[in-house]
Amino acid sequence: MIAPEAIKWNELTTVDWPDGKTFSGGLYVDYCETVSPWISRRLALEYMRAEGRGGRFQELSLPDLDVDYAAMYYNSVGFPVLIMQKGNMVIHALFYTTKSTVDFSLDDWTRINCELLGNKPNITVK
């Protein structure tokens, strides 16, 4: 088995802050631990290749992260997607908001996903 641990997870949520602000949105995550870093890198690159086949996507710049590979882009329908690989772990995550009065930046979202891989990224939260 090349990926003994593979998790597919999605969530739709609304969070109400005490000051009356709200955040509504969702997250789709594919997380894999493979038997080797080489396979994980190939999986991360395949996620990028598959999205590029769909036609239009806009690659985004990323801060300096302590990972082996990272890419972020808006997919063909305009949602931000983050792909990160560190060692034998890969995260492919799509994030979207439906209704929000809270500014949840892509930097915030990148920080959360990077911490899932056990990193402390150098990101300034706005």
Image: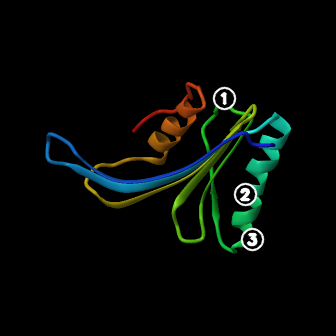
Name the side, left or right, on which 36 lies relative to 95: right
Q: Which residue is mark 3?
A: 53
Rendered residue at 45%/40% (across/down): 108
Compared across the picture, whether 103 is left or right of 91 comes to left
Real-space CA distance between mark 1 and mark 3, rounded to the nearest whole angstrom? 28 Å
Task: Indicate the amino acid at tag 2.
Answer: Met
Q: Amino acid at mark 3?
A: Arg
Label 2 and label 3: CA atoms lie apart by 9 Å
Q: Classify mark 3: helix, strand or loop.
A: helix
Between 126 and 16, the one nearer to me in the picture? 16
Q: Residue furthest bottom?
A: 55
Picture coordinates of residue 89, whole percent (x, y): 69, 36
| Residue placed most toward the observer, 50 or 2 | 2
Q: Residue at x 14, y 47 (%)?
A: 20
Residue 43 drawn above or below residue 78: above
**The C terminus sits in image quarter:** top left
Residue at the image point whose x is 58% and y is 55% from the top:
81
Q: Amino acid at mark 1?
A: Asp
| Mark 1 neighbour class, 10 Å CA radius: few under 14, some 14 to 19, many 20 or more | some
Labelled pair 2, 3 in contact (Cβ < 8 Å): no
The residue tagged 1 is: 66
Determine which of the numbered discs, if any, sits on residue 48 in the image: 2
Of discs 1 and 2, which sits in the foreground?
2
Residue 23 is left or right of residue 48, and the answer is left
Sequence-earlier tag: 2 or 3? 2
Depicted 99 relative to depicted 37: above or below: below
Q: Position of residue 90 (x, y in %)?
A: 68, 41
Q: CA distance from mark 1 to mark 2?
A: 19 Å
Q: Earlier in the sequence, mark 1 or mark 3?
A: 3
Q: Most extreme residue toward the front, as rendered?
A: 1
Q: Residues within 10 Å of mark 3 (few under 14, many from 20)?
A: few
